[in-house]
Each structure stands twice: as structure tokens, then as C-alpha cells.
Image: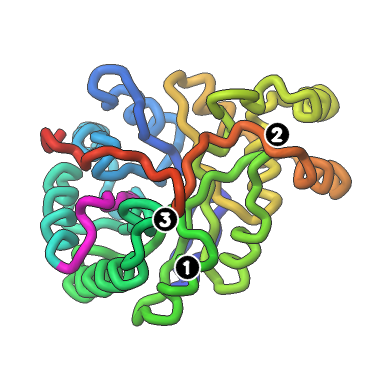
């Protein structure tokens, strides 16, 4: 991992991370150990995912120096608020077996969807509590997840510590151009969850445009997806369970898509959207009730 983005606080972060959502073998630890072996050093998790503890176990077992790894985690909607933040952070730190989190994020901007009229106040209250965690040294920097421009604007106008990243569902067929541009204009790095476009229907793997481009560049569709995001200045966080896929996802730095092909992909019809929306379709789940 020799290529990095520089965040707005000067910190350098690898251009590709490893997503741990729903990884599923041997309590997730094996997959993470394999990812470390492949060279991944930036790991994304969340209290909701129930992979914080396996990530902590894997990092401990690997023997890798803590300073050489970047850990990003998120607090869930039922952990928001001035009181909830501190308890949520302590639980995450204990599960991760570390004394600090590199990037701590609000997972969703609203708790209950469009009828949540107090979301702006709750977001600010939550974020200000997270700023105190930075002051205490328990968190190095702050980020957001699923924050569209109107959500991000609310934070930017009321924060003391600028968020460094905003994680969104981003992939060919759902590139959210306006949201990405808004992040960049405000010096917030856009990150991509579900960067390989594995939506419930019409997943990008069989998309005719992407298949043609994969043939043109002698690459997989997944590699075309990742290269597209990187050339758009977006940090993708792909998931993978096999070593071959992990290595393939890292093998995207030795080719470039043409400007015409970037434009073609950017103009694709919507496809592979997972169906979640931060204002209307929020996952109805609880955060790690068993403290896994």
C-alpha cells in the first residue's frame, strides 16, 4: 500500500481500506488476518457490525504495531447523544483492545427517518461530544457516514473540529456526484462503502457497460469499479473473504481508465443501489446488543 490520500488535518491514509461488515469465517478473525497478510493497513468497522472484537483480536495476533494500522469505527443511531457517545466509545475501545480510535464516525445522520424533526440538534450534540473524545485523546479524528450535503452542512456550520471523511454508498451506477462534489469542496474526503456495487438487484458484476470495459482493460469488473472510484478521488472500502479477491482489490494501481470511460461510467443509469437512504430508509437495527 504505497499510495495515500492526505486528510484535511495532514494525516495520510491508504487509498484503499478493508471493510469488515458481515465477514463470516472463524468469528471474522481469519479474514482480517489474511487481509493484513495481503498488505491492508486501514480497517473499517462499526459497533453495529459486531466485528470490532474480531478486528482487535486479529490485530493483536498479527503482532503488527498499533501505529502502523488505521482503525475506523462508527457509533450507531441508538448510541447518539451527549451521554451515549462516551459509553459507545468505551465499548468500542474495549472490543478493539486499543486505547484510541483513528477515525470515529456518526453512522447515520437521522435516527428515525423523515419524521425525525430533531436530527440537526441530535447530530450537533453527538458531534460535540465526539469532539471531547478527541480532546481526551481517545479519538484522533472525526468522520461521518451516510451524510448527504444538507446533513454535512449542519455539522460544518457548528463544529470545532472539521470531519476528515464522509462515507457513502458509492459505485458505478450510484456515484452520487453532487454529494461527492460537496465533500470535496469542503475538504472532506469521500469514502465508498459497497464500492463493488453488490446491490440486491442488477449488481454491477453483470452490467454490460462494465463488462465491456473489463474486457477492454483486461481487468475484472470489480477492478474497474475500484479504479473508477480512485480516479474520482474517492477512497473505496471493499469487502472480501478470499485471499485472491483481497489481492485483486489491491491490484488497481497499475492502470488508468480513459477520461471518456470515466465520463461514460459517471453517466450510467442507476443500478445496484442497496435501497438505504439517510432521510427515508434507515436500517432498523440495534447496536451490538450482545457486546460481540
Question: Tag 2's secondary structure?
Answer: helix
Q: Position of residue 219 (x, y in %)?
A: 73, 26
Task: Identify which residue is drawn at 12% across, 37% down.
Answer: 291
Badge 2 is on which residue? Answer: 224
Q: Nearer the viewer, residue 285 or 84?
A: 285
Question: In the rendered structure, which disc, 1 or 2, sits on the residue that comes first in sequence?
Answer: 1
How far apart marks 1 and 2 lie (CA) works out to 29 Å
Nearest the eye: 275 or 234:
275
Left or right, 155 with respect to 260, comes to left
Q: Which mark is residue 292?
A: none
Q: Tell me whether the residue at label 1 lies in contact with that at label 3, contact meaning CB atoms closer than 8 angstroms.
A: no
Which badge, 2 or 3, is on the more N-terminal residue?
3
Residue 190 in the image: state x and y as whole percent: 54, 57
137 or 232, nearer to the observer: 232
**x 26%, y 67%: residue:** 126
Left or right: 116 as drawn, with respect to 287: right
Question: In this rendering, is residue 28 above or below 15?
Answer: above
Circle 3 sits on which residue?
114
The residue carrying pointer 3 sits among few (fewer than 14), some (14 to 19) or many (20 or more) residues within 10 Å by Cα, namely few
Q: Is residue 77 inside the magenta stretch?
A: yes
Amino acid at each position: 500500500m504505497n499510495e495515500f490520500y492526505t486528510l484535511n488535518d495532514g494525516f495520510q491514509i491508504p487509498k484503499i481500506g478493508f471493510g469488515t461488515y458481515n465477514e463470516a469465517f472463524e468469528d471474522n478473525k481469519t479474514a482480517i488476518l489474511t487481509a493484513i497478510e495481503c498488505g491492508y493497513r486501514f480497517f473499517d468497522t462499526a459497533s453495529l457490525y459486531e466485528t470490532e472484537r474480531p478486528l482487535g483480536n486479529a490485530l493483536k495476533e498479527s503482532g503488527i504495531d498499533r501505529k502502523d494500522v488505521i482503525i475506523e469505527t462508527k457509533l450507531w443511531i441508538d448510541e447518539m447523544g451527549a451521554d451515549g457517545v462516551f459509553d459507545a466509545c468505551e465499548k468500542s475501545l474495549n472490543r478493539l483492545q486499543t486505547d484510541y480510535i483513528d477515525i470515529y464516525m456518526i453512522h447515520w445522520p437521522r435516527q428515525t427517518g423523515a419524521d425525525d424533526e430533531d436530527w440537526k440538534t441530535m447530530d450537533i450534540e453527538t458531534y460535540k461530544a465526539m469532539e471531547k473524545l478527541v480532546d481526551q485523546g481517545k479519538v484522533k479524528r472525526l468522520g461521518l457516514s451516510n451524510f448527504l450535503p444538507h446533513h454535512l452542512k449542519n455539522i460544518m456550520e457548528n463544529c470545532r473540529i472539521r470531519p476528515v471523511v464522509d462515507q457513502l454508498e458509492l459505485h458505478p451506477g450510484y456515484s452520487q456526484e453532487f454529494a461527492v462534489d460537496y465533500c470535496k469542496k469542503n475538504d472532506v474526503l469521500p469514502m465508498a462503502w459497497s464500492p463493488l456495487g453488490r446491490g440486491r438487484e442488477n449488481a454491477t458484476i453483470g452490467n454490460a457497460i462494465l463488462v465491456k470495459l473489463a474486457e477492454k482493460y483486461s481487468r475484472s469488473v470489480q477492478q474497474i469499479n475500484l479504479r473508477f472510484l480512485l480516479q474520482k478521488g474517492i477512497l473505496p472500502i471493499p469487502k472480501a473473504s478470499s485471499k485472491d479477491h483481497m489481492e485483486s482489490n489491491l491490484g488497481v494501481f497499475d492502470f488508468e481508465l480513459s477520461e471518456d470511460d470515466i465520463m461514460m461510467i459517471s453517466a450510467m443509469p442507476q443500478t445496484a443501489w442497496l435501497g438505504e437512504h439517510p432521510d427515508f430508509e434507515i436500517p432498523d437495527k440495534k447496536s451490538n446488543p450482545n457486546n460481540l
